[in-house]
Amino acid sequence: MSTDPEDKLLEIGVVGRAHGIAGFVNVFLHNPDSSILSELETVLLQDGTGTRSVQVLEARSGQKKCIVRLSGIDSRNNAEDIKGAKLLVRRSQLPRLDDDEFYVADLIGAEVFDGDRRLGLVTAARPQGRVELVTVTSETEIIEVPLVEDFVVSVNCDEGKLLLTDTHLLPVSPRPKRAKPKKS
């Protein structure tokens, strides 16, 4: 059974500490230049208690973060309780992109090649300063690749392929071996 890609949940940021006493929180967006929180009515809040829909009552930009007030979070204690929670949106809530643009989250699961050599699959993505890094995992190694022109030849999200060059210049980590269960 295939799911609609527009229903896919994407993480857009993480809740930081409380801001003031009225329930505001600091939110660190994965794209610090984004104004997405001031454009959305609702987001999904995922913490240790589960995932729930919350209204975005107010969002304003600060330095390297947003200051946000969410429904149901009306005190400093409530705000501290959600520290570390993830903010998620449905793919359909994000703005439409131009033909030459893509969301980094759409690369998760893509096959990665350096020329004709298959390197593995994109298993994760994370911001590193102003650059996104994707983690490429094979059976034997892990490579973190910055998504910059020096390494990226082409991206085809529809086909699930990422073509790179010069990956021999990147540090490679051996993939940890799984422990074998002991026989009793």
Image (tube, grey):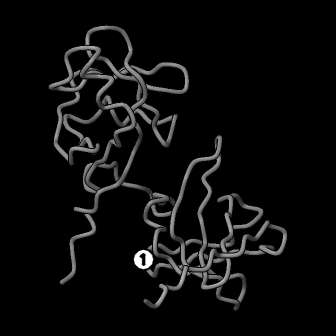
Which residue is nearer to you in this view: 50 or 89? 50
Q: Residue at x 33, y 42 (%)?
A: 87
Q: Residue at x 65, y 41 (%)?
A: 129
Pointer 1 residue: 158
Q: Specify the quadrant of the image occupied by residue 24.
A: top left
Q: Is residue 92 left or right of residue 137?
A: left
Q: Residue furthest front?
A: 184
Quadrant assignment for the N terminus: bottom left
Which residue is nearer to you in this view: 21 or 110? 21
Instruction: Judge whether 7 appears above or below 178 on screen.
Output: above
Quadrant assignment for the C terminus: bottom left
Instruction: Judge whether 179 appears above or below 104 on screen.
Output: below
Q: Is residue 31 left or right of residue 114?
A: left
Q: Residues within 10 Å of mark 1 (few under 14, many from 20)?
A: few
Q: Amino acid at mark 1?
A: Asp
x, y percent for residue 121: 54, 78
